[in-house]
Amino acid sequence: MTHPAHPDPSGAEHLDAQQAARVRVRGPATAPEEEEVLLAPRRGHVRRRATPGQVRELIRHQLRLGVLLGLGFFLLVVVLYLLLSTVAGLADVTVLGVPLPWVVPAVCFYPLLILGGWLHVRASDAAERRLLTTIGAAEAQGVERRP
């Protein structure tokens, strides 16, 4: 028999109480709004009310930027592939004992992918800052925005 001042040495009662108090969290009940995703305060953004049209324009801008960077990279890959496969003798060239068709992706493609990603993040952040500046200027002037 255990005394209330002295807990059960086996901890069985304590474990049962902990298991009874547990609550399963399966995630948010609703999907986050566009503003919650795009204008996150943890990224240093001040929470301001953006109209749905402004947020859609921001999304379109970022999508256009991503598609343009992706198409540019794809075209570069296709052009280099055609160049390496059609120019006679180019595929036989070796650099430090490694065939040129292996060197080109390692030296060209991977750094370009990293650069493209870096440019996309910079341009996307700049577009978000422009949107926040526009919203902040409108709020400072007291301009009423339609949702």
Image (tube, rainbow, N blue to C red):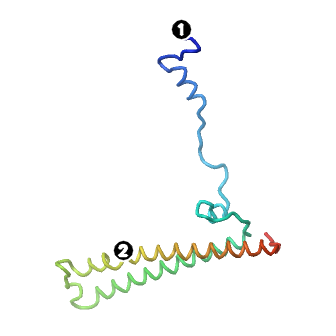
Say if 27 sits above or below 43 in the image.
above
The residue shown at (78%, 73%) is 140
Dot 2 amino acid type:
Tyr
Residue lying farthest to the bottom in this orientation: 88
The disc, 2 or 1, on the residue closer to the chain's N-terminal end is 1
Q: Position of residue 96 (x, y in %)?
A: 18, 79
Quarter the C terminus occupies: bottom right
Q: Secondary structure at mark 2?
A: helix
Q: Secondary structure at mark 1?
A: loop
Disc 2 and disc 1: Cα gap in Å?
A: 69 Å
Q: Residues within 10 Å of mark 2 (few under 14, many from 20)?
A: few
Please state if 72 lies on the left or on the right of 97 as rendered. Answer: right
The residue shown at (21%, 79%) is 99
Q: Please give the residue where the numbered disc 1 appears in the rendered image.
A: 1
Pick the front one: 48 or 22: 48
Dot 1 amino acid type:
Met
Q: Residues within 10 Å of mark 1 (few under 14, many from 20)?
A: few
Foreground disc of the pair 2, 1: 1
The residue shown at (43%, 76%) is 115
Q: Position of residue 58 (x, y in %)?
A: 64, 74
Q: Position of residue 78 (x, y in %)?
A: 38, 83
Mark identifier at residue 110? 2
Pick the front one: 19 or 42: 42
Say if 73 sits above or below 42 in the image.
below
Q: Position of residue 51 (x, y in %)?
A: 74, 70
Residue lying farthest to the left in this orientation: 97
Mark identifier at residue 82? none
Say if 127 sits above or below 88 in the image.
above
